[in-house]
Amino acid sequence: MFTGLSIYDFQEQFGDDESCIDALVKLKWPDGFKCRYCSYGNYCKTKRYGERRCCSCKKPESATAHTLFHKLKFPIHKAFMMIYLISTTKKGISALELHRKMGVHKRTALLFKRKVMASMSSLLLFKMDGEVEVDETHVGGKGKVKRGRAKGDKKLVVIGIQRSGKGISRAYARQIDNAGVKELKPFFQDHIAREAQIKTDGWRSYRSLRKKGWNITQEKSDGGKNFDALHRFIMNFKAWLRGIFGSVRDLQPYLDEYVFKFNRHKLKGGIFNILLKRMANYPPRTRKEIFSVT
Ligand SMILES: [Zn+2]
C-alpha cells in the first residue's frame, strides 16, 4: 500500500508495471488464490506477469481480470499515476488534463477517469447522524425553473450534510428528477440515520417525510443564512464543477467524485489506497455501461 505523499514517493513505489501488478495481485487475492470457476486453491504461474492458472481446471486469470483495470489500453503504471493524480489533486483533475499529462488518447483518458469515478460511488456504509441539513439545488442550464423540478440542462440535486460545530463532517448528493417524496425518500433512507435531527426549509415533501416518522424540523430559509454550512457546501461544489468540467450531461458521477473526496479530505495519501482497493474489487465496466446515462 502507498504510504508516502509526494509524487517522488509514488514513482518509486509504482513506477513500473510489475510493481503495480504486484499491488493488484495482493488486493485481488488477499487470502491467497481461489479459482473463481472451481474454487480450487492451488495455482501455477504463467508467462504473463501476475497471471495465475488454476491447477485443477487449468483456467488462467490475469491480475486485471474482473477489476476496473480489465482490458486497459495503456500501461498499468500510467493508470496508477492517473489514480494518484485524481486522488491527490485538491481541486480535482479533468479527463482532458489527464490526456495531456499522461499522453493517452482523449477518449481513453475520459473512459478511465469515469471508471475511477464509478468506484467512488457511495457503498452506503455510513449514514449521516446528529445534526443533518437537507436542501435541493439546481445545477447547470439557464433561466429559472420552478422549485422542485428539473428541466432540460437544469438538473436537480438533493444535498445533505452532517454538521460538526461550524463545519461539515459528512455530505451526500444525488441527482433527482423532481423534489417529490418518491425521489427524496430513497435519499433519506440511504444516507440519513433514523435518529438524526434533520433541518430543512418549508418545502412540502419534507413535511410529508416528517409525517412518515423522520425527525425533521422545518424552518423558513432566511436567504440561506440559517443554512450557512449547507449553502457554502453547495456553492463550493458548483464552483468546482464550473472550474473543471464545464457542462456536464450526466451529473451523478461528478457528485460522487466531489462527495467521495470531501468525506475523505483528511486522509490525503490514503485516498489513493481506498480507490485502488475499490477498483480492484469492482466488476469491469464497458464503455457502453459507463456512458449509458448520456
Ligand atoms: Zn479452477
Image (spheres, grey):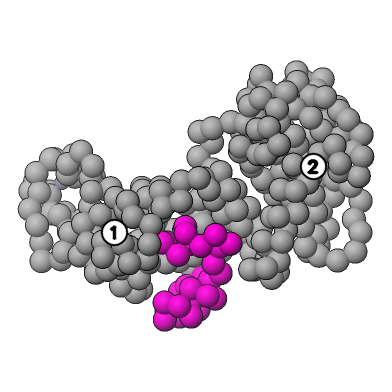
Q: Residues within 10 Å of mark 1 (few under 14, many from 20)?
A: many
Determine the secondary structure under disc 2: helix
Residue 228 numbered mark, or none: 2
Residue 257, above or below 210: below
User: 88 or 86, which lies in front?
Assistant: 88
Q: Amino acid at mark 1?
A: Thr
Residue 252 marker = none
Residue of label 1: 64
| Position of the C terminus by quadrant | bottom right
Closer to the camera: disc 1 or disc 2?
Answer: 2
Q: Position of residue 71 (x, y in %)?
A: 34, 66
Q: Which residue range is magenta in the image?
A: 83-110
Q: Is mark 2 within 8 Å of ligand 1?
A: no
Position of residue 240 measured from the top left corner of the image (x, y, whole percent): 67, 61
How far apart are labels 1 and 2 at the CA level?
45 Å
Q: Residue at horizontal 79%, vertical 49%? A: 137
Residue at 21% in and 57% down? 22
Image side of residue 244 versus residue 209, left or right:
left
Q: Earlier in the sequence, mark 1 or mark 2?
A: 1
